[in-house]
Amino acid sequence: MTDTAEKRLLPAYCISFPRNRKQIVMGKINIIDTVSAIEASIRSCEICDKKNSIIELKSLSNAGEWKSFHETICAFLNTDGGYIICGIKEKNDKSGYVFTPFDRHNENKLIELHSTVFQDDSDIYPNLTENISFDYFDFMTGSVAVVKVFPLRNDLKFIRYKGKYYERKMTADVEIAPARVTQQKEYKAELEYAKEISIVEGAGLKDLSLHKINGYIELINKGKRNETLKANLKQAKSFLERKHFSKDETVTTLGMLVVGSDPFHFLEYRCEVDCYFDRSNDVSGDKQFLKDDVLTLMDDAFRFVWGHIKIGRSYEGGGKSVPEYSEELIREIVNNALAHRDYAINKFITINIEPSKQIEIKNPGSFKERIKITDTRTDIPVRRLIPGIPESKNPKLADVLKVFDKIESQGRGMSALVNAALDNKIDIPYYDLKDSQHVSLVVQSGKLVDESIEYWLRSFNNYIYRHLRTALTDEHKQVLAYFRKSELLNKQRKYTILLSESNNHFHVIVQLKEAGIILEHAASTDDNPVYILNRELMKENFIDELIQWYGEQILAWPETTKTVLNIIYRYSVYNETSIRPVEVTPEVYLIENGKYIDPKRYESLGRKVRKIINDLSEMKILINKEKGFILNKEYKPGNTLFAN
């Protein structure tokens, strides 16, 4: 692709991309780099797979291609947006690309995308100028057209093409299930009475900041200028009303949150975030009570959290220190808390940081029942939250925050948390919903596949292999760890996020299900299957089985002895291998003391475990095999060496 592709002036009716290279990015995809890579691939005849959930290729060489093109744009609008490169298609055998230059005589068809192709629920063709733009790039011997699609605001979804609603799933455009369409319609009906645009009592235009208003306008104008800066508040009146910041000289909650001069004076605790560090220890702790507009609160709350979590560090790659949580994740959870809280409730947000343990964000509001899957009728209680369902109480605020680059697509916050856990950057996140007026999100530090999971999987290794007929991959481990920890948290009345195909592990879930390693719970539906582990894999206490082999004498033995026997039973029965005392000790320590090691206590426990195993060996309950110990299934009862 030549440099002129970035310099050429386009006709006025062609909505062009921003010329700044860094701005031609969506979802960490730089489209200029992508087009260049495809061109290089064609020239070199080397395979270069560039299709993904937000990049699609279309040749537009026939009517079928145009239909598929429209379906993809509809899907992008209803999901997370994306790019369509027009004039290139993938070969049938996936071995490369075919270039068919975009015919500029079809430019009117691109312009029509703005107003005559897609319909909303009221059969109206909405103006999509702000959501769809296109540009041309020199390519090989001709040019390609690149269409950039921004997702619709949540209160405008879903849109349809020829009577059908589409969404993006991985690299496919699929019809949205009728139940989800109905759900979305109900959600939009609720938003007719949105609290974010309610009138703030006693506030007028004089209580808004002209400086903040013009700052917002400058951001809107990035890439294309379509709003003039305001010389005074009277001149800004029309703009404020269009953005739902004011109505008939009065100010809305939205307006006060974003551009208010003194928002706390009018909104009180709705504009407050109370931050605590290690609140359990008042001597060494720290706290700040932040009061300001929503954008300043996001920045100040982030700085507090980021400044304090740096105290707790883990070490990777030869001693390189990294924070407990990524900067991106902290921004996401802080910004989402302020974006999606219930502003009808006059209470503040609380952020509590416990170093090396967790961050808890307590947010005024509650989840709608449609997002929750709660089933406690069986012995396996399920408490899961469905990601991706529109839940924002403040869609217009969310739209403003996107301009400030504070949040991404609505409904993606939960998926981002799940993905961070599956990438082993954090332990499994969960929600505490016991308080009907608050939602508490707990983001645990550490890893999803931690020592406890490694021990567990190692002890069941052969059992899993016999079912799966292949060795466990890291992806298998991540999914199994997520399901195991979800189930354990659900038993504690905590809600975890439903793991689904949207988290890009669908093929692993299918593989584990076909192998009988995971099962569908009775709470499953066609749209939202709920998975639990094979019941053998959730067993932790094998005392009943041990009694059958070694008699009821076991019941009188010390708890640590029972714990050691339980661990060795797992390895003997499910993994068919012996285990050494040095491998038993860390598991016993984890069970009795947690993951934080006290060296003296650990050393003492190690000696205790070795003595227990030696005593069990003398009793012939254990057999020394391959430098480790395994249960003796031929045991004959004799005298015990243990006493309470």
Image (tube, helix red, strand yellow):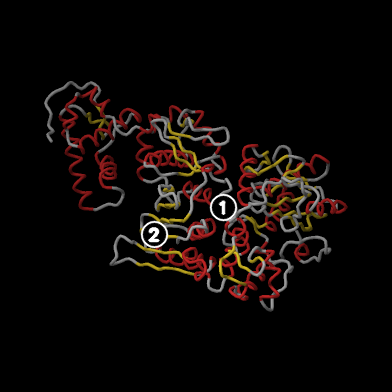
Q: Amino acid at mark 1?
A: Ser
Q: Which mark is residue 352?
A: 2
**In which image quadrant can residue 8 be found?**
bottom right
255 left or right of 499 in image: right
284 left or right of 333 in image: left
In terms of secondary structure, where does tag 1 sit? loop
Q: Amino acid at mark 2?
A: Asn
Instruction: Please name whichever residue, 144 or 490, is drawn nearer the observer in this view of the structure.
Output: 490
Other-residue count near label 1 (Cα within 10 Å), few / some / many at <14 / 14–19 / ≥20: many
Q: Disc 1 or 2, which lies upstream in sequence? A: 2
- In the rendered image of this protein, does residue 133 appear above or below residue 478? below
- Residue 556: x percent and y percent? 16, 31
477 left or right of 642 in image: right
Residue farthest along the bottom direction in this orientation: 231
Q: Which residue is mark 1?
A: 392
Instruction: Please name whichever residue, 189 or 98, is drawn nearer the observer in this view of the structure.
Output: 189
Q: Where does the N terminus fall, quadrant-wise?
A: bottom right
Residue farthest along the right direction in this orientation: 105
